[in-house]
Image (cartoon, coloured by chain):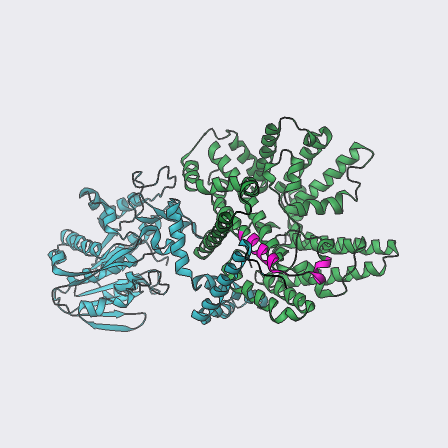
Amino acid sequence: MLFSSTTFLFFFLPIVLILYYTVCRKSRMLQNVFLFFASLLFYAWGEPIFVLVMLLSIFMNYVFGLAINKYKYKKSTAKVFLFITAVFNLGILFIFKYLAFVIENINNLSGADFYVPQIALPLGISFFTFQAMSYVIDVYRGEQVQKNPLNVGLYIAFFPQLIAGPIVRYETVAYQIQCRKETFDDFSSGVCRFIIGLSKKVLLANTLAIVADSAFNSDDGNISVAFSWLGAIAYTLQIFFDFSGYSDMAIGLGRMFGFKFLENFDYPYISSSITEFWRRWHISLGTWFRDYVYFPLGGSRVKHKSRLILNLFIVWMLTGIWHGANWTFILWGFMYFVLLTFEKLTNLHKSGKLVWLRHIYTLLFVILGWVLFRADNVTEAFSYIAAMFGGTGTLIDNEALFLLKENIVYFVFAIIISTPLLKSLYYKHFQGKKVVSVLVVVVLMVLFLVSVTYLVKGAYNPFIYFNF
Amino acid sequence: MKKFKFTYKNIIAILFVVFIMVSFVLSFITAPTKILGGLARGYLNSPEDTNVLSKIGNGFKDFDSRMSEYYVFHDISINSYGAVQNLIDKKLIDDVDPEYEVLKLNNGYLTFKNTSDEDLTNLGNYLIDIKSVCDKNNINLMYINKLSKTTDDKDLLPANYPYAHKSNYGELKKRLLQNNIGVLDIQDIVDEQNIDKYCLFFKTDHHWTPKTGIWVSQLITEKLNSLYNYNLNSDLYDISNYNVETHYNAFLGSQGKRVGYLYAGADDLDVITPKYDTDMSVKIAGSGEILKGTFEDTIIHRECITPDNLLNKDQTAYDTYMLGNHDLVEIKNNNINNGKRALLILDSFGCVVAPYLSQNFQQLDCIDLRSYTGSLKDYIEETSPDVVIYMATEYQKN
């Protein structure tokens, strides 16, 4: 099930809210159990069979957590269980997500003809697998183990962040599972956040997707410079509003049920360095890799620069691979490894000079990175990038002009909203003013209602998280 | 107890909750079986070799599509969506199926984006095949190139519109003529007579208007007279021979239904019935239904006109004529004794042509190859019409 669907808005959410705040109000345990089963239904709505994969993941990680907790004073044994946890979780991920890719490449490289299995990818497997590992690792690190398997299930499967994050760390929600307090103010903040996220996804991301897809799916690949840039920028905005919109909805929904999740995006496109970009983009993933991979490897506090570079290489190759089973993602991760290593060694990200130039440098590589990310294969990615720099010999074409004119309103709003301009204006000049408060109510409700019309119309609603 | 504060966020939350609850309750009050039935339908319609969990998944998918379709504020949403697109001057309205994206031309008419190239080679092969069957049985064959709303006219298309529709109709026409198949090219006539072709269409639908149906019937009879020396009465199609009853803003066509009436308005629908006496019978083979009586009794179905429900999911006002598409319809005209029998191969465009064309034939049989499961060649041989009039692009592969 998607948040951006009439089934979620007018069937699932009303029923869950009603039952949670009435029938289940009697006890926290009842509320948690209800949310867990509601989350299973939410997940099963997409493809029921994959609920079994998630249930297996919940059960095994629950068992691993108990085992690690049992041997918490015998670190060597606990470490073995931690290792088994990693093997199990990464093994599931490997089978569903990477096995076919690996076999294909072995066949291509060696000329062998091994059978390539066609395995469907369970929705959100990358997210809930990492979330499950986070639980066990945090227990290993001293967090109190969860004796109730349904609470572990709730943590892993909670529907707001199940399919597309943010990757919620167990240590940040452990207390909230039992001891959260639902208030109407929090509920209201959650609703506002949800509406903002829904509007970002439905109005901006889905519309810009049409432009991006037109450019990237161009029949003969001979697109003009203008169209290739238009497509690349459209995708840059699409992926931001899609992902951050979904995170906003997840955070908003969590808040409606008393959970406070950490922020996942912080205006990444205003960054003046790649280092800063990754502190603002998909924060939960970045911090997951930082805390569970980078720091245990030694991070940047290592004796030799070569070790630092190796640590960065491992983290960024894993980040690339996490995003999908394709050489494009690996290349994308490698690109960021190179840039981040360069910045770390030169301290570029700490420099205060030529900020405008650093903004351009950052945005340029981010956009080129998204081209790699979006392309179906490496050849297509490089062809597209070549087109961006005049490779096809055509500067501008009708399709670019037409699509730009058709979607100019969306482009303008998307660019403005990808910066903190409106937020800054509000807090500096308009906060607390009654007229502005009334305006905010009107604007948010209009955005919500317009989003509903787009959903009902059945307008283009692509699902970027298919790879994850 | 903490005093409840009416902050702007609290107001938004209240409005949001009220809206989703009202939507939920009213949707399931107004169409409970239709929405919930999707679960059962999706499950039961799954292929036999599907496992139970996948069948359940299919049930969920069906539920999803019905939830949108029968959502209580569905029509308001579609119309509001169209209003927003109008406000931002959007010319190309996207759709889940790119071929059905709606394009608003500069003259205000809607058309489908329709960029897939039309290859009529196989149709040509089929028509040549049919010709050999017709020749064996001394039956005339005429192909009609229907007029469509698609255009390459840059004055009508939005500025810089990049999508083109290609068709090899020119090659088809050449082949047909080479094989002595009569061709009525309506586009040629429109060009010769300098007619604005869009006047022949509904604004919000891809079909011809009923008046166009009468005009095309006249063109067909004139061409048949000229090609095969029939003595059909083309003067019958003078509009003064008909009562025209206009239902204003009563029809939202297939393009209009995708964008709502606030995007491009709605169409008027003419119900055109002969002033002269008629005595007909219309047999719809699929249902076995036989209607007998006047033109009004047998052809016109006014229950399809629902101006208060333009986005009617279950029917379209276009079905006023002949109740829409059927695999085989036999129209007998008891007031005509010219012994002439025709077989019209049609698609939905034929719904406004067949009724008027039938006025010149003792019997007019209409076959829609999209749903007809029998063999057209066998039908031709068994019924031996005087002429086969082919006004479609579908063909049978066997």
Residue at the image position 18 percent from the left and 42 percent from the top: B192
Chain painted in cyan in the figure: B
Asked which quadrant contains residue B155, the reply is top left
Q: Residue furthest top?
A: A354
Q: Is residue A134 above or below residue A37?
A: above
- The answer to whether one can see residue A106 in this image is no
Where is residue A460? Give x, y as percent: 47, 51
Where is residue B316? Give x, y as percent: 32, 62
Q: Is residue B374 left or right of residue A453?
A: left
- Viewer-proximal residue, B360 or B12? B12
- Viewer-proximal residue, A11 or A46? A11
Q: Residue furthest right?
A: A74
Which secondary structure dominates the residues rendered in magenta?
helix
- The answer to whether one can see residue B165 in this image is yes
Q: Quadrant of the N terminus of chain A?
A: bottom right
Where is residue B361? Give x, y as percent: 16, 63
Q: Is residue B241 above or below residue A393?
A: below
Asked which quadrant contains residue B3, the reply is bottom right
Q: Which residues are magenta?
A: A174-195
Q: Is residue A18 left or right of residue B290?
A: right
Q: State yes or no: residue B340 in magenta.
A: no
Q: State yes or no: residue A182 in magenta.
A: yes
Residue at the image position 59 percent from the left and 69 percent from the top: A19
Q: How many marks?
A: 0
Chain painted in green in the figure: A
Where is residue A337? Give x, y as percent: 69, 36
- Viewer-proximal residue, B359 or B156? B156
Residue at the image position 72 percent from the left and 38 percent from the top: A313
Residue at the image position 65 percent from the left and 26 percent from the top: A353
Q: Is residue A236 above or below residue B367?
A: above
Asked which quadrant contains residue B132, the reply is bottom left
